[in-house]
Amino acid sequence: MKKIIASLFLVSAVALPGLVQARTLTLTTQLKNYSGDGAYLAFYVTDASGKYHKTLWVAGKKSKYYKHLRDWARGSRLNPREFDGVSGASVGSGRTLTVKVDLADALIDAGYEIRVDTAVEDGRENAVDARAPLTAKGTGKPVAGRGYIKSFKYDM
């Protein structure tokens, strides 16, 4: 019996990684020229109904400002496990932020979308500043933002 269980465990360990495949996405965000400090941005995935699914990246190191990224903050509940290891510096006016993230293949062409919330200290907060359907056909196609973001795109 122990040999059977050990064999099943070994087969599972070899087979499961092939079932859960991920690909690397490059997220490129160009900010508009604005006056003020660096922008905080939260990149996250929502399902077809708009419900929060997963954090991809957070730009801005001071977590005390994360509450201003409203929709992302509500969805992630500001749980540090959601953004630990996926954060970097804020982004200045007119600058471009490019980051690479891993995403499960199962989320592509399945009704999910990438959303970006933005905020600037002593400035506006923009829930869903930019959004893009997560599809194979959408790769490389920039979308306009409605706040601090001039354009956002993802590449697979």
Image: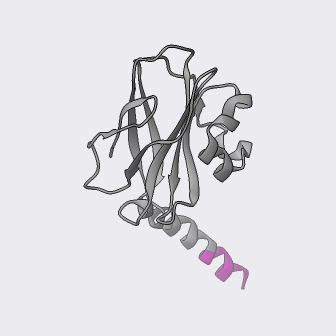
The relative height of residue 68 versus residue 19 in the rendered view (above or below) is above
**Residue 37: which quarter of the image?**
top right
Residue at (55, 18) in percent of width and height: 38
Residue 93 occupies quadrant: top left
Rendered residue at 61%/38% (across/down): 69
Residue drawn at the location 52% of the way across and 67% of the way down = 16
Quadrant location of the N terminus? bottom right
In which quarter of the view is residue 142 placed?
Answer: top left
12 or 132: nearer the viewer: 132
What kind of secondary structure does the magenta stretch mostly adopt?
helix
Determine whether, in the image, residue 115 is placed left or right of residue 144. right
Is 5 or 3 nearer to us in this picture? 5
Query: Quick check: is 81 in the magenta stretch?
Result: no
Magenta stretch bounds = 1-8
With respect to residue 37, does 30 lie above or below? Answer: below
- What residue occupies the far bottom of the structure in this picture? 1
User: In this rendering, is residue 91 above or below 46?
Assistant: above
Can you give x and y, in whole percent of width and height, for residue 60 in the image? 60, 26
